[in-house]
Image (tube, rainbow, N blue to C red):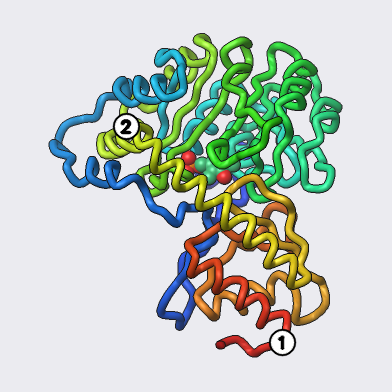
Amino acid sequence: MSARPQPRPGVMQIEAYVPGKSSAAGVAKIYKLSSNETPLGPSPKAAEAVRGFNHLELYPDGGAARLREAIAARYGLDANRIVCGSGSDELLSLITNTYVGPGDEGIFTEHGFLVYRIAVLAAGGVPVVAPEKDYRTDVDAILSRVTDRTRIVFLANPNNPTGTYIPFDEVKRLHAGLPPHVVLVLDAAYAEYVRRNDYESGLELVATSENVVMTRTFSKIYGLANMRLGWMVAPAHVVDAVNRIRGPFNVNGPAMAAGIAAIQDEAHVARAVEHNERWAAWLTREIEALGLKVTPSVGNFLMIHFPQDAGRTAKDADAFLSSRGLILRRIDAYGLPHALRLTVGDEEANRLVVAALRDFLNGTKTHA
Ligand SMILES: *Cc1c(COP(=O)(O)O)cnc(C)c1O
């Protein structure tokens, strides 16, 4: 017996998730480009729904029926196959806790979203990392790591923080190669941003198989990160199991009201896609013209690679940019210490980033 309570095995192996910074010492105006939030904000209708929300004393609808119906109508789904969560992070944990127990293995990719590792360890499971090829998911590397202890495979498509994706043919090949008892989680947090003919989020695969789950979020293109709202769509038996361990009132009323308004405002989403198309391409061009390598991204963020010589590293760049109020994301925790992740911002922020990177590379001392 120990002298004080001990966390379960796995818990102390977790490096707690460190969110992107949102401030910089001594700088008045901050441009937060570290968390892939949208520069357009939420639909005005969603903001209005939150402001007009009444009856804070009443419990929310624990079944999130109206929100599930709105999502189902928008995506042509069966509302009974949808579960809503307090952010998709909560759903990723719920799915993992439903299928992974002590000693079971969960596979994710080398630079995959950090929440997967945390979820697997928190469930007592064993994280298994599949190497990537050129910052891209390697389906064969995942398949070669499947054992009879494998219970879950996570695929962020597109992936954060790399911004890369795999075509739907590759997703289908991954699914076809997995044993039927393994849950394949398709995390499509950035699906709305992708404009590629060979990309599909995989809703069709969820509908036609017994072991594929998709998670989606209102935090990114819908601009509702602060409300904590996500959803998943899954086979009926998965929905049934996950609902047994879900907190009975895990999504709050203002979040649901905002989500319903947001998902119906397709014009707002279209504006966000258009803004992103234009500025992601512009940022990529301009930053590459400065001599930095940018990994081609299909999301609303870019991974920028820095040299490793003194004074020009990603760490140095981060300090320089921060001194001008430009907050990017260090991604050392993703095994990417020589890169920074930049969220596509509004025009002002985007132009300031390029100007600051130019000054940084020219050896200018901090302030312009
Ligand atoms: C941002 C993000 C999420 C969404 O998290 P929420 O909990 O819904 O805010 C999920 N997966 C990936 C890969 C992300 O980048």
Position of the N terminus, as image quadrant, is top right
Q: Residue at x 50, y 75 (%)?
A: 325
Q: Quadrant of residue 355?
A: bottom right
The image position of residue 154, as x and y in percent, is 66, 31
Q: Residues within 10 Å of mark 2 (few under 14, many from 20)?
A: many
Circle 1 sits on which residue? 363
Q: How many marks?
A: 2
Distance, label 1 to label 2, CA atoms, is 49 Å
User: Closest to the observer: 53 or 38?
Assistant: 38
Disc number at residue 349?
none
Circle 2 sits on which residue? 260
Residue 190 appears left or right of 70:
right
The image position of residue 243, as x and y in percent, is 43, 19
Q: 233 above or below 286? A: above
Query: Going from the N terminus, do you reach mark 1 or mark 2 first?
Result: 2
The image position of residue 112, as x and y in percent, is 69, 43
Q: Residue at x 31, y 20 (%)?
A: 65
The image position of residue 21, as x and y in percent, is 51, 64
Q: 324 above or below 1? A: below
